[in-house]
Image: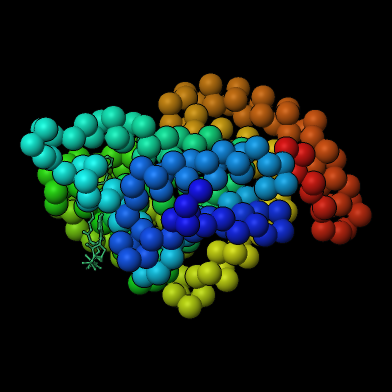
Amino acid sequence: MTEMIRRDHRDGWWKITLNRPEKLNAVNEVMLGDLLSVLDAAAADPLCRALLLTGEGRGFCAGQELGPAVIPDEKGPPDLAKLAGTWHHQVVRRIRALPLPVVCAVNGVAAGAGASFALACDVVLAARSAQFVQAFVKIGLVPDSGASFFLTRAIGEARARALAMLGDTLDAGRAEAWGLIWKAVDDAALVEEAEKLTASLACGPTEALAAMKRMFAAADQNTLDAQLDLEAALQGAAGRSADYAEGVRAFLEKRAPNFRGGR
Ligand code: LHQ
């Protein structure tokens, strides 16, 4: 494991920091491999019940490193489909499939695949000074890492198409107003607010939160009938969990629940 991905263990949750500030945390294969390893380790550790993803320095993530792996040379053009499929898209798949909530604290610019990594997370906070840039068009590429999926669903096709085609910068305030992210917060408050939020999710009913991820993943493709069936099945499972028994008991006893997660 290199130092380009930092992992800090907290009480019931981990903080993952993209740590290549001199390049605004632009990612390369080594860094993405490390990130995938950390995500896998989190999935395998029952004591990890939530994740916080953020970036070191003044950027969150400037997308793919525009370096040797992607620069056409005398051997011809790079295989970007392979690169994206092997690394960037696995990160997005992994974040979405993790059976625990993932919070993103967008501390600065999120460009290209970097914006997609943020949008793949479950709850996205951004510093008011942060910006989202669909930078792909500026170098002759198309959105990837789920950008066309996330943008279309979150903010509608008109805005998604314009952002992708123009490459305009979207500030955090407007991203919040458009429903692309959960909240824009004052720069100085970002870390504390994101850590508090992640800690509170880590004390939540982890199995139910994981089931919600499955539910929302299916909501787009399902008919209402199919979604009702899925909700009933997942509610059935939630109703059999220890956290449900504890939640109801705590309500009746007029105290805060002590969810154990049960992963
Ligand atoms: C960087 C980068 C960077 C290297 C800043 N690479 N050095 C593509 C291909 C294949 C497979 C899968 O997926 C993808 C998806 C993608 O992500 S494509 C999009 C790639 N990213 C970009 O095109 C963004 C490029 N960066 C920028 O446009 C700007 O840096 C932004 C708008 C992010 C920030 O601008 P500024 O705040 O003005 O900062 P800066 O440009 O001065 O950057 C600071 C340093 O970071 C600078 O280095 P230097 O040594 O001059 O101080 C940049 O060269 C470096 N940097 N992004 N992606």
Q: Residue 217, relative to residue 140: is it above or below?
A: above
Quadrant where the C terminus is found in the figure: top right
Left or right, 234 with respect to 26, comes to: right
Is residue 126 visible in the rendered image? The answer is no
Q: Residue at x 14, y 48 (%)?
A: 139
Q: Splitting the image into four quadrants, where does ligand 1 fall?
A: bottom left
Residue 170, image quadrant:
bottom left
- The image position of residue 240, as x and y in percent, is 80, 30
Q: Residue at x 11, y 32 (%)?
A: 75
Q: Residue at x 37, y 37 (%)?
A: 87
| Residue farthest right in this picture | 253
Left or right, 106 with respect to 240, comes to: left
| Residue farthest left in this picture | 74
Is residue 246 visible in the rendered image? The answer is yes
Q: Residue at x 86, y 59 (%)?
A: 255
Q: Nearer the viewer, residue 62 or 223?
A: 62
Q: Nearer the viewer, residue 3 or 239?
A: 3
